[in-house]
Structures are given as structure tokens and as C-alpha cells.
Amino acid sequence: MKIATLLPSATEIVCALGLEGDIVAVSHECDYPPEIRGRPVAVHPSIDAALSSREIDAQVEAALRRGDPLYRVDADVLRAAAPDLVITQDLCDVCALPSLDVEAAAARLPRTPAIVRLHPHTLDDILGDIARVGGAVGRPEAAVRLADRLRARVAAVRRAVQDRPRPRVCCMEWLDPPFCAGHWMPELVECAGGREVIGRPGRPSFRVGWDEIARAAPDVVVLTVCGFDAARTVAEARALAAHPEWRRLPAVIEGRVYATDGSSFFSRSGPRVVDGVEILAAILHPDAAAWRTPPGAWTAVPTPAGASPDAGSASRA
């Protein structure tokens, strides 16, 4: 079977099932596992990802207002790949190519491929998508085994943190403007022994004001920026010190702000979200973490000089 995986999570699922050799086309963001790099790229972004958070947000908003696509399909690459199966998504039109665009491109191929659409909102949905992909690629038993291993790892984290105090956590999916983290992220925080104070389980992320973040008064802030690794997140986070509400957050005052490789371990609805659970638990309860987290997956963010609970700081809800 020739498979086109047009989003990173689909690529990672297919590779985890042992079928990386069957992948004939990928998206511009498909970079894991390393063996997949160099495959024909059938999806390209219209926005320059090297821009700042603010500039990216402004370009996305302008494109959406005009009705311009954020991604484009390379029809020539897809035609040359001649896939039997295309895996796409219906979750977020900003994060990846929408399935309607994929279907339109697939309909123009000499032979129309089968299409699988991933649409996860929760951790169970992600594990269910692994089973769906396994069925579509002829590896149902391998998919069940993979999902069972992932569930066992999550259960081990839950046991390790079950009797510990749960800090108030704010995960930020974007920094300028600020967005909370949604969909499966609040659930991952709960599995890791924390309590997400803004994002809602199973619901999309949404823009929040600094006053709302201040009222939430998180004990820990975890920056899980969509599409960014830890180093770029640290660089972007320097600008947060300009906001007085940021400087007065309990998490900032106590030095409990962390940057993560959000692109690898939180934004993608694939097997590595379980690494994300382990990363969060290592951040929230380091003395309980008996597992290793991937190198470069997370780091503490230096807090600004002068951060203090001065007059006007938020009280805990």
C-alpha cells in the first residue's frame, strides 16, 4: 500500500506501526521519525513560520478574513506519488491542511485513493485514531498493541502522582496573542497530576486576555506553543515580561515557568502525546518521575527581574 500522510501525527502513527517504507508523500511539518525526512512533500504552508508569534497571528487572521488558504497541495507531487490511501484531518484548519482541500486534490488524481480523516479531541480519541489507522493500513493487531502500551504508560504516570497535591496549571498554546491550550491538553495535565485552570477538556484552544490569566493565578505555567520547539519558545517568551500581569503571576514569582517542545509532544495527536504526559508529570512532580523525558523536550524559562506579588496581583480562585 502506498500511503500519503498529510499531517505529522498521521506520519508518526503509520511509522509506529512499522510502515514507514510505505509512505510516499508527507506534509512540510513531517519530521519524525528522522527516517521520514526527505520524502516527497505534498503540502506547503502559505505563512512563513520563521516570523514572530505576533506576525504569524496577524498573517493568519488576514488570510482567514480574505478566505485565502493557509496551506496548498502540490498536485504534481501527489500525482507522482499515486497513493492508495491518504490520511488527513478535520481538527484545525490553522494547524494543518483541511480534509476538504485534500478530497478536492484527490478527486483530480487518475485513481482516487481512499481517505481517512483524523478528528481527535481527547486522549481516548487519539488512541482510537491509532486503531482506525491500523485498520486502514492492514495492521489492526499492531495498532491495538501500540494503544495498549501507551495506555499502560499513562496509567503508570497516574499511579505515580495520584496522592500528591495538584498545582494550578496554565498551558499556553500561543504567546502573542495568548491562547490557552485545548482539546486533549487539559486531560494530559490531569493525568500528570495537575489542574488546568483555563483550557477546557475536549474543547478547542481560545484566545485569552492577560486579565483572565492573572485571575486564574496559576502555580505553574507550561508553554506548549503549537509548532515551536523548546528553544524557540524560550526566545519568544522573553517578550512576556513586558506584561505586568505576567510578572505578578504566582508561577513567575516562584520560577515555575517551563518551555516545551510543543510541536513534538503536545500539538500532534499521535503516540508522542504520551511522552507529553510524562513531561508534564516531570515538570509538576519531579520527585515522582521515575522515567526519562526526551532530551531537549522541556526547560525552565528564566523569570524577569522584579517579578513580585505587588499591589494589584491576582488572588487565587
Image (spheres, grey):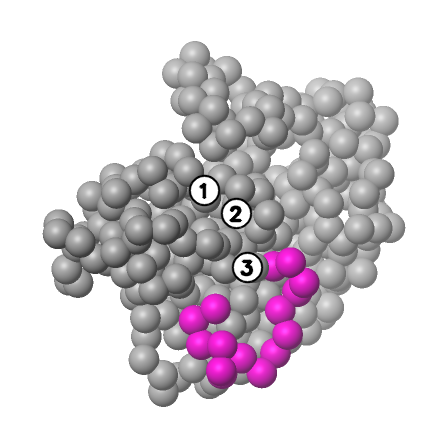
Above/below status of 85 relative to 316: above
* Left or right, residue 44 beside residue 61: right
Q: In the rendered image, which residue does mark 3 sit on?
A: 299
- Give the spatial CA distance, label 1 vs label 3: 14 Å
Q: Residue 74 at what x, y percent from top left?
A: 73, 22
The magenta-colored residue range is 283-297
Disc 2 is placed on an element classified as: helix
Q: Position of residue 174 (x, y in %)?
A: 43, 41
Q: Quadrant of the C terminus?
A: bottom left
Residue kind at label 2, given as amino acid type: Val
SS under mark 1: helix
Classify residue 224 as left or right of residue 116. left
Q: Secondary structure at mark 3?
A: strand
| Residue 83 appears in view | no
Residue furthest to the top in view is: 66
Residue at screen point 79% across, 20% down: 76
* Contact between labelled residues 3 and 1, with CB atoms less than 8 Å apart: no
Quarter where residue 102 is shown: top right
Which residue appears at 25% of the width and 39% of the height?
209
Q: Residue at x 76, y 53 (%)?
A: 33
The circle drawn on residue 238 is: 1
> Hey, what amino acid is under mark 1?
Arg
Mark 2: few, some, or many residues within 10 Å (few <14, many ≥20)? many
